[in-house]
Amino acid sequence: MNAIIMTEEYWAHSPFSIARYYGTIKVGEKQYTLVNKDGLTIFELSHPTSKHYVGDDNMAIPPGEPADLVLNEWIPIYRHLGRAKTIELVQQNVSLGEALLLIPEAMRPKQKQPRKRNQTK
């Protein structure tokens, strides 16, 4: 599966709807997380220690607001560029690397460095 963003209209009436209960779903090696229109994850909105916590009596993502399943690597892009621009980039088949160049370097996620193996001689 090569999806980057699944809008609620797509995922809510599919096998991916299980994400509404867990906030995330793993498909093969790819992890997707529910985000609101600002790119904040459901976990950031729901956890009391998060600076984005919406409160006990509020819904994390109210009805009528976009609730997209986004490939985790694309969440920083979604958050910085916005929903419409991210969907536009995906429709234009822009790669993750190219999309990351559109956000300031300070806001880019840190790339994991491959671990060096101990070489014994």
Image: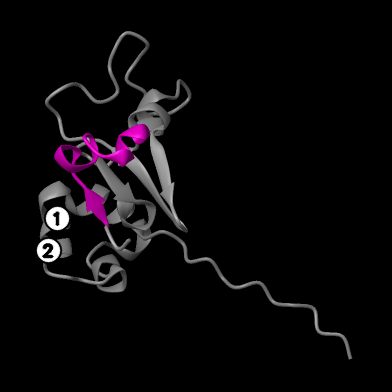
In the rendered image, the residue lying farthest to the bottom is 121
Mark 2: amino acid? Gln
The CA distance from mark 2 to mark 1 is 6 Å
- Write the residue at 34% across / 37% down: 41
Q: Position of residue 57 (x, y in %)?
A: 32, 8
Where does label 1 land, which residue?
87
Q: Position of residue 107 (x, y in %)?
A: 34, 56
Q: In the rendered view, tell whether residue 6 sits above or below residue 109.
A: above
- Write the residue at 34% across / 65% down: 105
Where does label 2 land, which residue?
91
**Mark 2 and mark 1 residues within 8 Å of each other at the beta carbon:** yes
Magenta-drawn segment:
4-19
Q: Secondary structure at mark 1?
A: helix
- Dividing the image into 4 quarters, which one contains the N terminus? bottom left
- Write the residue at 11% across / 25% down: 64
Q: Secondary structure at mark 2?
A: helix
Q: Position of residue 36 (x, y in %)?
A: 24, 35
In the rendered image, the residue lying farthest to the right is 121
- Write the residue at 29% across / 66% down: 100
Place residue 30 in its image quadrant. bottom left
Q: In the rendered view, tell whether residue 20 sits above or below residue 108.
A: above
Q: Is residue 89 left or right of residue 116?
A: left
Q: Position of residue 49 (x, y in %)?
A: 48, 24
Place residue 52 in its image quadrant. top left
Magenta stretch contains residue 107: no
